[in-house]
């Protein structure tokens, strides 16, 4: 009888979540500050536990898959471009902050060019894992646990701030204001993240919410094309942008027939062939240059 009760409890819980999803699908839903705070703590605990498990199992000793090489081949292109952009700006004596570093998969990219790298994340074990990853690859990192919406760094501290896939966990205005503050003059913010216009990808995210794999606030904060206006307003001009995976939903059909490598090339070709559909992309890459907020008076 226990399994019957478990199924009933799951169906009741899923029904409640389903009603919430319908409201999200019909129109944007605001959340209270308390609810957002609870979601943030839940995500923090989720990622901290995941990193702690990796540390306890000594998975940190196997870091062969670094950066884009650890991403499935069929969706690798935006991450390769993200890495390329970081490398373009990285050189000796450049200071890089990897924001919301996670377990440090993309934290070491700039270190290959001799840049000095700092990692930060709200989850303690994520920072520990990132530092161990750097040690494994012979790249020295410094780390600090902290909230991206209130960074504990001095003004004008970094030449580059990077962020891979974390904007849906953050208040955009708060974090972009912080990024502008800690960037040096002429500094750049480089990110790769998801877009939330394509109904197929939105539905997939909602399924993960139903399963308890992500929180409601991450659905509401998933970037849309408006994020580029936010970049311009809070940080500075977007000097480079690209859109990827408009037709990624075709992967289950194409990959068995063409293989991963050819499927990726086909999808990349389709992305370039249909620029008018860029708002339906799965991922985007952006490079944003810091603007000075000092008022300049025009001569009378």
Image (cartoon, rainbow, N blue to C red):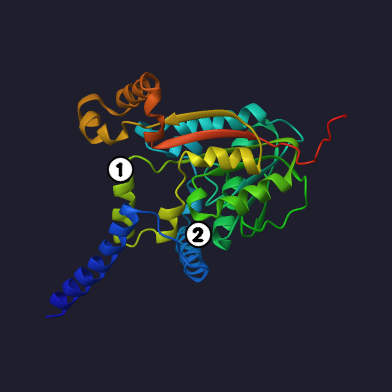
SS for dot 1: helix
SS for dot 2: helix
* Residue at 37 percent of width and 32 percent of height: 245
**Vertical placement of residue 246 versus 101, above or below:** above
**Vertical placement of residue 88 versus 20, above or below:** above
- Picture coordinates of residue 187, whole percent (x, y): 71, 36
Q: Which mark is residue 275?
A: none
Say which quadrant the C terminus sits in: top right
| Closer to us: 295 or 92 | 295
| Residue 15 placement: quadrant | bottom left
> Is 146 placed left or right of 248 in the picture?
right
| Residue 217 placement: quadrant | bottom left
Residue 138 can be seen, yes or no: no
> Is 263 placed left or right of 118 in the picture?
left
- Picture coordinates of residue 80, whole percent (x, y): 49, 30
> Is 71 placed left or right of 97 in the picture?
left
| Closer to us: 55 or 275 | 275
Residue 145 can be seen, yes or no: yes
Which residue is identified by label 2?
A: 55
C-alpha separation, residue under disc 1 versus residue under disc 2 = 37 Å
Which residue is identified by label 1?
A: 199
Mark 1, Cα crowd under 10 Å, few <14 / some 14-19 / many 20+, is few
* Residue at 58 percent of width and 43 percent of height: 230
Say which quadrant the N terminus sits in: bottom left
Mark 2, Cα crowd under 10 Å, few <14 / some 14-19 / many 20+, is some
> Is 22 placed left or right of 86 in the picture?
left
- Picture coordinates of residue 143, whole percent (x, y): 66, 54
| Closer to us: 234 or 126 | 234
- Picture coordinates of residue 73, whole percent (x, y): 37, 32
Going by the picture, which residue comes out furthest to the bottom? 1
* Residue at 40 percent of width and 44 percent of height: 196
């Amino acid at each position: 009888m226990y399994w019957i009760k478990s199924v009933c409890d799951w169906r009741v819980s899923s029904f409640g979540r389903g009603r919430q999803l319908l409201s999200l699908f019909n129109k944007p839903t605001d959340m209270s500050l308390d609810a957002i705070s609870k979601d943030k703590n839940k995500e923090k605990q989720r990622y901290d536990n995941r990193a702690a498990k990796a540390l306890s199992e000594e998975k940190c000793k196997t870091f062969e898959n670094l950066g884009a090489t650890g991403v499935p081949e069929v969706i690798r292109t935006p991450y390769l471009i993200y890495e390329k952009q970081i490398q373009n700006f990285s050189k000796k004596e450049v200071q890089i902050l990897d924001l919301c570093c996670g377990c440090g998969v993309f934290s070491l990219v700039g270190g290959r060019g001799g840049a000095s790298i700092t990692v930060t994340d709200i989850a303690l074990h994520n920072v520990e894992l990132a530092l161990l990853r750097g040690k494994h690859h012979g790249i020295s990192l410094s780390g600090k646990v902290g909230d991206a919406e209130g960074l504990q760094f001095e003004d004008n501290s970094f030449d580059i701030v990077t962020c891979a896939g974390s904007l849906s966990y953050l208040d955009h205005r708060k974090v972009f204001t912080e990024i502008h503050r800690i960037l040096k003059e002429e500094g750049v913010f480089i990110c790769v993240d998801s877009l939330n216009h394509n109904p197929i990808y939105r539905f997939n995210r909602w399924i993960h919410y139903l399963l308890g794999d992500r929180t409601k606030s991450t659905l509401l904060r998933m970037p849309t094309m408006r994020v580029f206006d936010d970049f311009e307003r809070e940080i500075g001009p977007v000097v480079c942008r690209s859109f990827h995976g408009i037709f990624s939903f075709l992967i289950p059909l194409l990959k068995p027939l063409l293989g991963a490598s050819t499927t990726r090339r086909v999808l990349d070709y389709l992305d370039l062939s249909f620029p008018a559909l860029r708002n339906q992309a799965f991922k985007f890459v952006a490079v944003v240059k810091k603007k000075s907020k000092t008022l300049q008076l025009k001569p009378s």
